[in-house]
Amino acid sequence: MAEAMGDGQPGEPAPETVHRYPGPAIRRGYLASAGGGAASLVLAFAGHGNLTVSVTCITIFVLFAAYGARTAFRGASAIVLDRDGLAVVGPLRRRVFWDELADVRLRYYATRRDGERGWMELAVRGANGRIALDSEIERFGRIAARCREEADARGVEMSPATLRNFDAAVAGSFAAGRLISPMGARGAGRER
C-alpha cells in the first residue's frame, strides 16, 4: 500500500509517498520464475545428450533465474516519490533528481493482439542513472502524473506515443495492475 511519510532519516529528503509492488504481483513473479526454471531444467536433462537442446534449456533456465532475482529486488524495494525526485530504496538504490531529468518514456506492452490488455513501463533517466517501473506498482497513475508534470516543467521532450500513454495512465485505465483498453484498438499508443 502506498503510504505518505513525514520526515525521512537524517540526510535523506522527506518523502511524499512510498510505493511498493503488491504481494500478489511478487508471488506471480516467483511462481513464473520457479515454474519456468523447473521446466527448462527438466527439458535440459531430458534432452538425451543432445548438446544443443541442453544448452538452449540451460540458457532459458538462467533467464528465469534472472527474472526471479528481479522479482526479489522488487519485493525488497520501495519507490519514493518526493519533492526532489524519484528514488528506489532497497538493495539496489537509485535516484533521479527532478532538476537533472533528461528523459521520460512511457511504453505500453500489449498481451493480446487487439491491444486491449497489457501493462506499461515508465522509464525516467537523469544524470545519476535510470529508474524503470511498471504499472503493477501501487498508484502507478500518481507516479506517472508527477513524472509528466516534472518533465513538462523542465521542457523534456517526449514522443507522441509517450504522451498518449501518459493520458491513458493518468486517466486511471487500470484494473488490478493491468491496463485495460488504453488507447483503442491495436494498442495505438505503443512506443517501440
Image: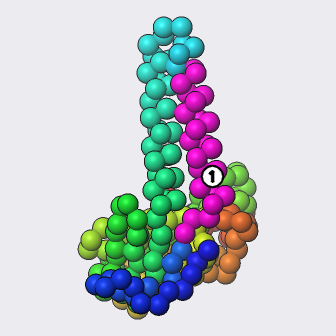
Residue closest to the far front:
10
Q: Is residue 182 visible?
A: yes
35 in the magenta segment = yes
Q: Is residue 150 visible?
A: no
Q: Which residues are magenta?
A: 20-43
**Direction top: furthest residue:** 48
Q: Nearer the viewer, residue 186 or 13?
A: 13
- In this view, 6 is above or below 140: below
Residue 63: where, in percent of width, then height?
A: 47, 38
Residue 82 picture quarter: bottom left
Residue at horizontal 71%, vertical 59%?
117
Dot 1, crowdedness within 10 Å: few (<14), some or many (≥20)?
Answer: some
Q: Which residue is mark 1?
A: 27
Q: Is residue 42 magenta?
A: yes
Residue at 45%, 56% (x, y): give it: 73
Judging depth in this view, the residue of 187 and 83 nearest the camera is 83
**Circle 1: element type:** helix
Q: Amino acid at mark 1?
A: Arg
Location of residue 6 in the rendering, given as x and y in whole percent from the top left corner: 47, 90
Q: Is residue 25 left or right of residue 88?
A: right
Where's residue 83, x and y in %? 41, 90
Look at the image and tell me in which quarter the N terminus lies. bottom right
124 with respect to 47 (left or right): left
